[in-house]
Image (cartoon, rainbow, N blue to C red):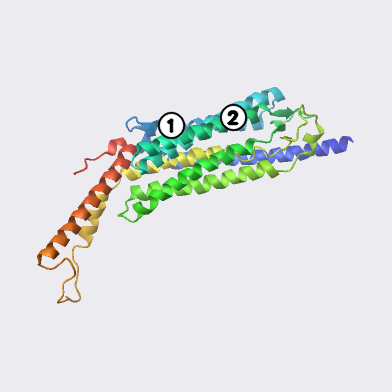
Amino acid sequence: MADAATAAFLDAAKSKQVVTYLDLVAAAVLAYDYILNIGDEAQYIWFSPFSLGKSLYFLTRYPVIVDTSLVLYHQFAVLHPGQCDVLFKVIGYLLGVGTLIAESILVMRTWVIWNRSVYIGSALIIGLIVCWIPVFYFLAQSLNSLVFADPPIRTPGCFLHSQKNILFVVFLIITGFESVILVLTLIRFTPHWRRKKTALIETIYRDGLFNYVYLCILSVCNVVVLLTAPVSKWLISHQSPFSDQKYVQRGYSTLLSALQRVMHSILSSRVLLNLRQAAAGPTLMDSIDIDATHNEVVFQPWVSVFPPLGQGTGEDSVALRNMRSGTFRRHEADEEEEEESIRRVSYPSSGRTVNK
């Protein structure tokens, strides 16, 4: 009997060890990203003028260090169930708030590509509130239901015995909100992509699409783990104050939580950092001037005796030519003004005067 209990405990310890490995992976990814971007952060973020974007960057970039440190602490410290309960709740709410800040950055990016529309901005803020009220409700329900088992020997880490099986709803809501962000991005994608593209325009759409793909994959994996992860025999053998089937005993319920929090922080901060780098680069008119210079000499293989429509000397041709020229200038001015709007929000110190 003792051998069976020991074997069951070792099984629970192995599942906990797998979770520890994933938490270490999350910490390593976070540290590596800091090393890669410390120079760009100093150049484009630290000494730039204060703005909403800069505030959101700091809030999503650096508090994740605290979250990850607490995650590693609870994996390696010898704690009793009461301490584990407090620590898990603190980490859980920090993860929730951190993810909310990361989503706020995606909201701001979407609002910017919609030319800072009041209607789109209001709809996004309302959507954020409507989604995150139930997110925090289900998160609180899950955290308040945590029950930890006391291992037979003093073992580092916390052994989660049971919790309400509702945490997956949090990830479904977040994925749904991010899907709305993706749809709004794609609606603006086509008209932008048909025009002259600069690094700023390419960056704002590329990051938006990649962010959704990466975070959606992580959210789906989290839902699958929460619903299908194997149950620990040793944890089942311990009595739980809950007998309802809505409560489950799974050692892998936090398998991807730290990694998803880290990726939310990294990807959302990269959105702002990449935008600032691109905003400091050439404008749309700079690109047009460069192309015009490169194409200054054009060799005509032959000349038709019938000039193309709008290139003749008659009144109709002159009027058509003027209409085309005026339309091009209007589109050019609109595009430059739109890009400058994105540039001002992304990097206030790089603002340029738009000639009307």
Q: Which amino acid lies under the numbered mark 1 shown in the image of this protein?
A: Phe
State the SS at label 2: helix
Would you call the spot at circle 2 few (<14 residues within 10 Å), some (14-19), or many (20 or more)?
few
Q: Quadrant of residue 224?
A: top right
Which quadrant: the N terminus? Answer: top right
- Seen in the picture, residue 240 relative to 276 is either above or below; the reply is above
Would you call the spot at circle 1 few (<14 residues within 10 Å), some (14-19), or many (20 or more)?
few
Given residues 17 and 51, the one toward you in this image is: 51
Residue 4 % position (x, y)? 86, 38
Q: Which amino acid lies under the numbered mark 2 shown in the image of this protein?
A: Tyr
Given residues 80 and 236, the one toward you in this image is: 236
Question: Does 76 sit left or right of 51 as displayed?
Answer: right
Q: Work out whether residue 23 can be spotted.
A: no
Q: Which residue bears the numbered disc 1?
A: 58
Q: Quadrant of residue 7?
A: top right
Residue 164 % position (x, y)? 69, 33
Question: Does 90 sit left or right of 55 as displayed?
Answer: right
Q: Residue furthest front?
A: 316
Q: How many marks?
A: 2
Given residues 111 and 56, the one toward you in this image is: 111
Q: Residue at x 56, y 39 (%)?
A: 173
Q: Which residue bears the numbered disc 2?
A: 137
Q: Residue furthest right?
A: 1
Question: Does 299 sit left or right of 344 as displayed?
Answer: left
Question: Does 30 sit left or right of 229 as displayed?
Answer: left
- Seen in the picture, residue 107 relative to 300 is either above or below; the reply is above
Q: Quadrant of residue 40?
A: top left
State the SS at label 1: helix
Q: Work out whether residue 147 can be spotted.
A: yes
